[in-house]
Amino acid sequence: MTVRVDLNISLDGYATTTDQTPENPFGEDWGRLVAAYTATRTMQQRVFGDTSGAGTTGVDEKYAAAYFEGIGAEIMGAGMFGLHDHGDDPGWRGWWGEEPPFHAPVFVLTHTPRPSISFENGTEFHFIEATPDEALRRATEAAAGKDVRIGGGIETVRQFLVAGLVDRLHVGIAPILLGRGANLWQDLRGLEDSCEVTSEVAESGVIHVTFRRR
């Protein structure tokens, strides 16, 4: 079993954007940050429901396909599920509609637990208040030998990295500069010292860097 993280970040290390507006809740920069990933065949199918076979099939697609392979459970923060914006809505079922792309149990870290939600495709959201160690124990049990992914947001990922609980970190570094937001690398100086590091450049210009803990 491997504990995995996959993130898109900018050249200057930012994994979040700051140009959201009420009219555009994701902002223009988010689209720039994830453009290469969302263009892949796998993401078009798994996230956007396009089963026509459309989408890129190069190096970015290889990593997009790997994102979903072998995952038995996921851990995410309340913000990634949307509780920061919709926490007062008892009917909120996440950003993904009735076909969330996870197909596995998902543990949402929150200080205000709520009833679990199940979907026909195997996705289950469980809302828990737990430390990273406690959440990982629950997710590992639910994964039944498969990998556990720490999905985000960035502060949740950083908690698991700082605690030394991540076995493999993959970042797709988009060739853009954001200049502000939440920086993945803050307080993680020397992370590479305990890892094997590999990199690969995609046709899109995205640099895929993987840190595997020794």
Image: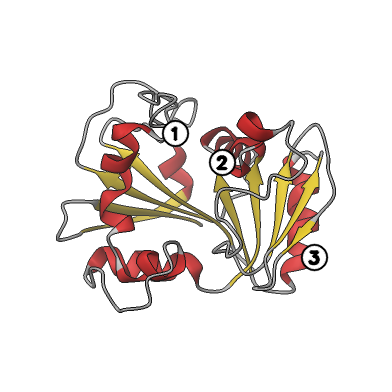
Instruction: Report the front residue among 66 and 145.
Output: 66
- Contact between marks 1 and 2 (CB within 8 A): the answer is yes
- Circle nearer the N terminus (3, 2): 3
Q: Which residue is mark 2?
A: 157
> As drawn, is 79 to the left or to the right of 136?
left
> As drawn, is 206 to the left or to the right of 69?
left
Q: Residue at x 29, y 21 (%)?
A: 179
Disc 1 element: loop
- Say which amino acid is labelled 2: Val
Q: Which residue is mark 3?
A: 141
Q: Provide residue 184's location: percent of width, then percent of height.
A: 44, 33
Instruction: Report the front residue among 59 and 97.
Output: 97
Q: Residues within 10 Å of mark 2 (few under 14, many from 20)?
A: many
Residue 69 vs 196, above or below: the answer is below
Q: Residues within 10 Å of mark 1 (few under 14, many from 20)?
A: many
> As drawn, is 154 to the left or to the right of 110?
left
Q: Provide residue 118's location: percent of width, then percent of height.
A: 75, 63
Q: Residue at x 77, y 66 (%)?
A: 142
The span from disc 1 to disc 2 (Cα, nearest Å) is 8 Å
Q: Quadrant of residue 153?
A: top right
Q: Residues within 10 Å of mark 3 (few under 14, many from 20)?
A: few
- Contact between marks 1 and 3 (CB within 8 A): the answer is no
Residue 186 vs 199, above or below: the answer is above
Q: Residue at x 85, y 49 (%)?
A: 115
- Say which amino acid is labelled 3: Glu
Please tell me the numbered disc located at residue 184.
1
The span from disc 1 to disc 3 (Cα, nearest Å) is 28 Å
